[in-house]
Amino acid sequence: MTKSKKLSKKNQQLIAEKNEMAMVEGILEGSPDGIAVVILRLECGCKKMAAVGKDGEPASEVIIYRDQAESICPKCKKDNGDFMRVSEEFIQWQQPEPSKSDKEMIQNKVFGTAPTTN
């Protein structure tokens, strides 16, 4: 007797997070100058990742992938994961994390800054 249960949303999320952390570890392992990995999650489900160095400069190639898929989606194949389709962006820091001011400098360099209004 075979059971064909669909994974719950929570289990799917946990698997996706574990896959993402494995990718982060792999990227950092292959990037000796990397102190963090920039992660861009796209609205289509694909992800773009790259290591960043202590100066805020790229420390690896950009990798684009989709969890549990043989290939990235057709949109990403066409536009290489256009920034207009980014739904979430953040940096996963390697331990020990840099100082708060260094983190801010790197985040500003990677993501840019937005003007503030009074």
Image: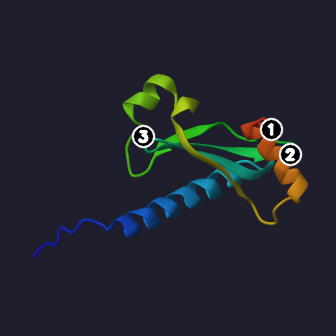
Which one is in front, 27 or 103? Answer: 103
Horizontal and vertical percent position of residue 46: 47, 42
Report if the CB atoms under discs 3 and 1 are less than 8 Å apart: no
Do residues under tags 2 and 1 come within 8 Å of each other at their CB atoms?
Answer: yes
Identify the image quadrant of residue 97.
bottom right
- The residue lying toward the viewer, choosing from 118 and 52, is 118
Quote the CA–CA distance across marks 2 and 1: 6 Å
Q: Using residue 107 as the reference point, say whether residue 98 is left or right of it.
A: right
Query: Helix, strand, or loop for circle 1?
Result: helix
Instruction: Give the residue number, with chain letter if any, for mark 2.
Output: 105
Mark 3 residue element: loop
Badge 1, how many Cα within 10 Å: few under 14, some, many 20+? few
Label 1 sits on what residue type?
Answer: Lys
| Residue at x 70% of width, y 53% of height | 28
Q: Is residue 33 left or right of residue 17?
A: right
Which quarter of the rendered picture does the C terminus lie within? top right
At x 36%, y 64%, the residue is: 9
Percent of width and height locating residue 105: 86, 45
Front-most of residues 26 and 106: 106
In the image, which disc is placed on residue 44? 3
Q: Which residue is mark 1?
A: 109
Q: Which residue shows up at 50% across the image and 59% down it?
A: 19
Q: Real-space Cα distance between discs 3 and 1?
A: 25 Å
The amino acid at mark 3 is Cys
Residue 62: image x %, image y %?
63, 37
- Residue 6 visible in this rendered orientation of the protein: yes
